Amino acid sequence: MSAIVERNRDVEHIVNAAAGVGVYGHGEKKPKRFAMLISTDIHRCAKQMQSAVDYLNAMDALDCGICLGDIQGANYTENDASWYYLAVNSSKKPFFTTIGNHDNGNNTKKELCGTKAEVLEKFIRTTRGKIGLPNIDKTYYSVNFDEYKITLIVMDNYMAPEDRDENGNFVIHRGAECLNQEQVDWLVDTLAAVPQDYQVVVARHGYPDKGVKLEGNWTQERGGLDKEMVLYGESELVPDVINAWTKGEKLVKEYAPIEAFSYLPTLTVNADFTARGEGVFVTYIIGHVHRDIIAKSAVYPDQNIITFAASANDDWQNYGCDLPRERDTKAEDCLTVMAVDSGKRRIHLVRVGSNITTDLVERTHFTLTY
């Protein structure tokens, strides 16, 4: 039996309950819920990555796994990332990868950064068998879970142009948040094609807008959601599109770059969801901030934003987080099970690993409505 399973026996029944697994009174069985194991900001911690896959393989209640970005510790070129794709490819279930700022390089120096084509090859194509898209050619994609009528949309919010200076360095920081027109059009088309009775989860590394923190045991007091290095300002582009989709409306709008990057093209949304009708949005799932936070979009309070503490077991990566980590104990791990009760429109979160904060707040499970 895997060590991570043994360390977390105390929450196994909670994971099963969240996923709807078990027998109830008079032998009644209820429909199982979609349940995903979430890791994020693994930052080169190979042991924690393999532990995540081991837990996913061991738990029948879980349908798939995802890493929400920042696979590398600091930059694109620091290692070949074989430890990551070997772990992911040992999964017996679908496993999805989101690109983070450090996976691009989080720098401008040519020797530390990768092009989008290189990032695609290194982190996505090496795991495409687990994504279930054999011909994948982008770092963003979508997958339908037909059994649960859930669509997972995985975005890449680091799509800045790759212009170089005279020394071959990138002009624009590889960790700057930036969509491009191609992905914007893809997002609109993907949402328009979502089956009428399916619900949508959007995975990104960085959050879609500033966000408003909510109180509760899953939101730590320290640390906020201020955006950084965003080439299109406090852009509400994605929340605007999601809002139009949920209401079954048209959206025609332009999004200009900030003044310092005025030479970048204006992004345009030209969406018409009227024929499809209203949609149901579950939540954004986000990495990047290395903290557990439940929030709402600052622009559209009906859009949930969930961020997660880093899965890395590294003092530097856990700076600012309120969850103590300790090797060779339960607190070595930091993963989250997210189960979606689409009938009652509830999101159940269960912590696998470190779940007692420095203020002795228990962060074992949490339920959020949508």
Image (cartoon, rainbow, N blue to C red):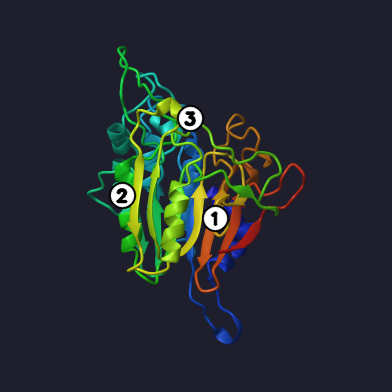
Q: Identify which amino acid the numbered label 1 is placed on.
A: Tyr
Observer-nearest of 268 and 197:
268
Q: Name the front one of labels 3 and 2.
A: 2
Callout 2: 10 Å neighbours few (<14), some, many (20+)?
some
Horizontally, residue 90 falls left or right of residue 320, namely left
Residue indicated by mark 2: 185
Residue indicated by mark 3: 73
Tell me, yes or no, if residue 177 can be seen here: yes
Observer-nearest of 169 and 279:
279
Horizontally, residue 232 falls left or right of residue 219, namely left
Vertical arrangement, residue 328 with respect to residue 187, above or below: above
Question: What residue is at 30 percent from the left and 54 percent from the top?
Answer: 132
Residue 308 location (% of width, % of height):
57, 46
Q: Identify which amino acid the numbered label 3 is placed on.
A: Gly
Question: What residue is at 69 percent from the left and 39 percent from the top?
Answer: 222
Residue indicated by mark 1: 300
User: Is label 1 in a helix, a strand or a loop?
Assistant: loop
Residue 167 location (% of width, % of height):
32, 12
Q: Residue furthest left?
A: 135
User: Is label 3 in a helix, a strand or a loop?
Assistant: loop
Sequence-first tag of 3 and 1: 3
Sequence-first tag of 1 and 2: 2
